[in-house]
Image (cartoon, rainbow, N blue to C red):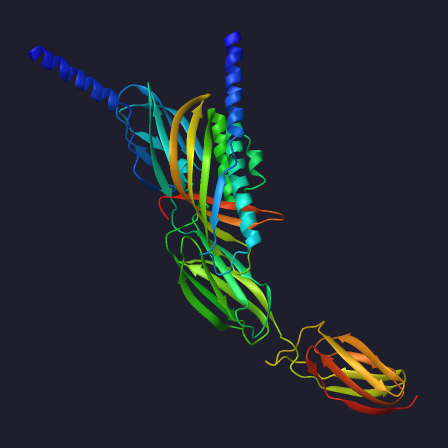
Amino acid sequence: MKLVSIGIFAALLSVSLAIAQNPPEVKLTVASAGPRAVESRTEQTLIRDYSAAWKSLADASETSSPALLNAYFTGGAKTTLSRELADQQKTSTHVRYLNQTHNLKAVFYSPEGDVMQLQDSAEYQMQIVSDEKVIHDEHVVVQYIVLMTPGADRWVVRQLQAVPAL
Amino acid sequence: MRRAWAVGLTSLLWLAQVCFAQEITPPQQVTAGNPLSIPTSGSGNATFYLFGPGSVLKQTAHLGQAIELRAEDLSAAGRYTAIVCGDTCHSASFFVTPSTVSALSFLAHPSRALVKQNDSISGVVFPFDKFQNLVTTPVTVNFQLTANKANLFSRSVPTRFGVVWFRSNSGNSAGLALLTASTNNISAQRALQLVASDPCNLRIKAQQTTKGILVETDPVHDCSGNIVPDGTMVTFTANSGAGRSTVDAPIKKGVARANLTPSGTTVISAASGVVMGNELRMDVKR
């Protein structure tokens, strides 16, 4: 009985530690963005929102809560990630995204300012957990192509697609 | 001595078997929507996991036999991690790349543009495959702007990392214009309204009525000969000995009208935007 309690406590602790991770670190360069120039306020908002998007993805994956994706993901990105989280729930597995660093580069900002394409060279520790046991632990460097669109008060991720190379 | 060698060799073989047990060797890249067979080595049962964007699998695998993945498990482009766990776990990663273009996401601006304006129309295209993956390999997109069956603009541009855009001048004629983006028999079309620009000149005429003076413009055109849109304001001004009065009137069907009530010798003029009309001098008797 005591062992079971300790086990549950340890599991809860690991979940809360994972959620309490530092927010993802995001660096953004906008020098090569065009045809529209990225305003400095937009730059700051993008950094804030992209970091929040990855934080919400990590939290949603850790707790198998697709609703956490709603605030910062939309369109194809949200559909794909929600499907992934539903599968994780079915298989009692989940992915942990730890110690995230994102080197973002804005490469396209539409003339009317309604969509931005970015390239993210992301680094993080990816742990895959099955039935509370870590079965895979890997430091990954992944290149993503990202589409973000402005919402009422934030930029949201519309497409998040890993590619072999940029 | 020979026995020691034999023991050593057996140990090495056993070690090699352990080391190479439950290996999985997926290809480095697969196209989205294709089934995949992943060879495994080793023997016995293991648990196979696949983690990718949009799908997670967990199933029993028979080591030594290939693991068959269905096309629908590999429809989302991105990085996949395949893991096989027996006594220990082994993993390999691979990429699923987008399939061929099956739809164009076409953002066109604005929906209403003035004629004869430089760089006033723009469009952005993102090519997607049938699984909603952004096609990142270069694709040539043809842009075309037509109005009144005339081709106003046409250009072919290759995508770069899954995006392409254009900018164009608006035409000279007001009316419906169609913007088309196409590639390999796939096209997307947007309609936009080209509207007349500001008035080019104003001519007014006036007649005395029982209520005062009815002033109206001739049909008002922009400098390309298009009737200016309804709602464009024309300001009529009457200067007489009694003072100055102005009336703003919107253009309806190309003409703006106003009733003025001056008395005595009156000079009537009209203006719209930066354009001034002719002046009329009338002697009004009431």
Q: Residue furthest right?
A: B286
Q: How many marks?
A: 0
Decide which of B233, B130 is in the foreground and name it: B233
Q: Residue furthest top?
A: A1
- Figure check: A144 above or below A12: below
Decide which of B253, B284 is in the foreground and name it: B284
Decide which of A141, A151 is in the foreground and name it: A141
Where residue B54 sits: x, y (%)?
46, 37
- Figure check: B36 above or below B115: above
Q: Is residue A15 left or right of residue B20?
A: right
- Figure check: B255 above or below A147: below
Where residue B271 sits: x, y (%)?
73, 81
Where residue A7 sits: x, y (%)?
50, 14
Residue B71 visible, this angle: no
Which residue lies at the image location 55% right of the left edge and 60% below the top edge? Answer: A112
Which residue lies at the image location 58% right of the left edge and 73% below the top edge? Answer: B115
Q: Is residue A82 left or right of residue B251?
A: left
Q: Is residue A66 left or right of residue B137?
A: right
Residue B22 visible, this angle: yes
Where residue B27 sits: x, y (%)?
29, 37
Q: Quadrant of residue B247?
A: bottom right
Q: Residue furthest left?
A: B2
Q: Quadrant of residue A141?
A: top left
